Image (cartoon, grey):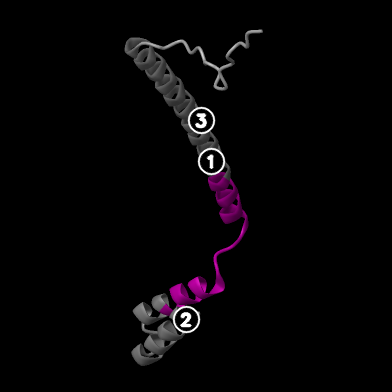
Amino acid sequence: MTTAHIDPTPTITRSRMGLRAMLTLFTAAALAVTAIVGAISLWGASQAGDAATRTFVAKDVTADILPPPMYLIEMRLVLSQAIEGTIEKDAAKSEWTRLQGE
């Protein structure tokens, strides 16, 4: 009776890829990733531009509807009174300083 010798480590047959094929595959993968990242970047830039436009329009509408803050109106009044001479220079200066703090 003869016993057959069984190899405990099976041989793995692997097809070897040549250097040229590996470089071609790597280049194709790199170009694909670059194209995907570029497309995502362009999409994100367009989305950001649309959001910025909506924000500016909303701010413009708000600025058109709301009156200016009261302290700005008072500052202009104090300035015009000081130029006309209807209030003293020191009083105008103190009012100006008070309004700047608001």
Circle 3: is it few (<14), some (14-19), or many (20+) Cα within 10 Å? few
Residue in the image at 40% along x and 91% along y: 91
Circle 1: is it few (<14), some (14-19), or many (20+) Cα within 10 Å? few
Amino acid at pointer 2 = Leu
- Is 102 on the left or on the right of 79, as rendered? right
Sequence-first disc among 1 and 2: 1
Which residue is tagged 1? 53
Q: Would you place residue 50 above or below residue 58 in this image?
A: above
Residue in the image at 55% along x and 69% along y: 69
**Foreground of the two, 40 or 59:** 40
| x and y percentages locating residue 5 in the rendered image | 57, 14
Which residue is tagged 3? 40
Is residue 59 inside the magenta stretch?
yes
**Foreground of the two, 14 or 11:** 11
Sequence-first disc among 2 and 3: 3
Residue stretch rendered in magenta on the structure: 55-78
**Real-space Cα separation, disc 2 to disc 3, in angstroms:** 49 Å
| x and y percentages locating residue 21 in the rendered image | 38, 10
